[in-house]
Image (cartoon, rainbow, N blue to C red):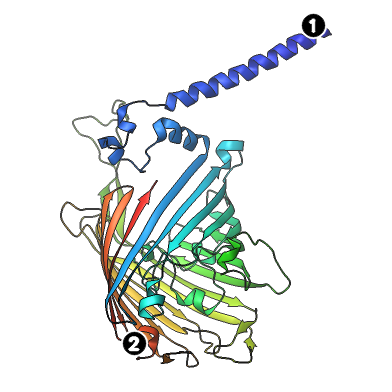
Amino acid sequence: MKRLSSLFGAALILAAASKVHAEYSRFWSYYDPHPSNYIGSKEWWEGDALLGDWWGVRNYLDDAGIEISATYTNNIAGNVVGGLSQGFAYADNFSFGVALDMEKLVNWQGATITVSGLNRDGNNLSQRNIGNQFTVQQVYGGSAVMFYGLILEQKLIDDKVSIKVGRFATGDDFASSPIYWLYMNNGIDGNPQSLPVNTQFSAYPWAVWAARVKVQPTKEWSVMTGAYQVSERVFVRNYHGLDWSIRPNDGILLISQVGYSPELFKREVPTTTTNSGKSVSDGKTAKNPVTPTEMKGLPGHYWFGAYWSPWQFNEIGSTTKQTERNSFGFYWHADQMVFQEAPGSDEGLTAWTALTLSPQQGIAKLPFQVNGGLVYKGLIPLRDDDMTTVGVVFGKFSEYSETAQGQQNYELVFETGYKIQLNKFAFFQPNVQWVINPGGTGNIPNALVLGAQMGVTF
């Protein structure tokens, strides 16, 4: 018996040693000491991240199911004309996170766990020098070190169904478009600003307990619905995102969205393929190859959403702290490529618009907001990844809304910018904003804001 135990123990040790050796060999197979990994090389400049692939360690972790990410974005802006006073302000956002592919790690099919945080610093030019509603620096807000996301996402039925639970914001999935992220004004960027202003529609960097279900039966159609925590503590930065309590006076926000993503005027275009190095088969010869094709058109995205919350909201302008229940509203979005430089290309002109409607004047500070704009990718020859943007934001204030400057009516902002994509991991975007009727009272001069935003992926 002792001999059998010794043999069994030896077998376990050999198996463990074999496993360690295999992992050791697999790790070092990713290691690349070549100078191309060093900052300053051509390969590094053309890579995906500022810090490169960590001499192969990053690729090893990615293939093992551990994806580490970090980004830095800043907004610099100066009010050169109008507003309350002339001034300059800087704000930045540093985000970091880890995504765990549970299928690769523990063979949990279709599951991903994400943990993320952020740090924000800087000053608010709109509050300090302009006095307007649609703040001109989109990364300002929640200036502190914050724990943000703790998310479990489970995909089912060939990824046609996605279930997401944990701590995240309503705006992560609803009323959000990559087009919005191209702008620096916070009336556009992220989500239309009226949504978090009018109700407890949480938006980055403010996470809450939440659950979201998305069903996408076809490539074109999708339906989402979600339930999100409502609390007076959501937008308090002193908690640093770590108040995870659910209290008796908390509420719930229910939201649903239907989306349609067509490709109009489809034509046959060559399929991008890679040569496997194998011989031509299936009766095809090198002298007469058959080029595979697919149908491609002008991409567009359209959606409609509605939200409702039975929580008690403070009435606007009430001196007796009166409240009103049942906040509700609607939002629409449409973006459509209207010109394509070549069939199947992503270069060309896209037009877009977004509208929100929150009818309750008593609790909705901005009952009506409409945004719109144009985005051209690759406008300048040989600058195929650059973006030229033009946008406008219009917001109508509640009839009960007023400030120390007077009764508020409307605010209008025009914005234009040019995003210079330096490489895959860095960009620089000069920006001009013209703020008309700042604060909506008519008592603050129109403001001209010159600025820029810059970003790096680490």
Image quadrant occupied by the N terminus: top right
Give neighbour class at mark 1: few <14, some 14-19, many 20+ (Cα, 10 Å): few
Residue at image position (40%, 45%) is 458
Amino acid under disc 1: Arg
In the image, taking residue 413 as reference, residue 219 lies left or right, namely right
| Residue 329 spot, x, y in % from top left | 52, 80
| Residue 279 spot, x, y in % from top left | 29, 25
Which residue in the structure is indicated by mark 2? 444
| Callout 2–callout 1 Cβ contact below 8 Å | no
Which residue in the structure is indicated by mark 1? 3
Amino acid under disc 2: Ile
| Residue 240 spot, x, y in % from top left | 58, 60
Residue at image position (41%, 81%) is 369
Q: Nearer the viewer, residue 320 or 426?
A: 320
Query: Is residue 186 placed above or below 28 in the rendered structure?
Result: below
Query: Is residue 283 placed above or below 49 in the rendered structure?
Result: above
Which secondary structure lies at badge 1? helix
Q: Nearer the viewer, residue 353 or 65?
A: 65
Q: Which residue is outermost to the left?
A: 381
| Residue 50 spot, x, y in % from top left | 35, 43
Residue at image position (45%, 90%) is 404
In the image, taking residue 375 as reference, residue 13 lies left or right, namely right
Residue at image position (70%, 11%) is 10
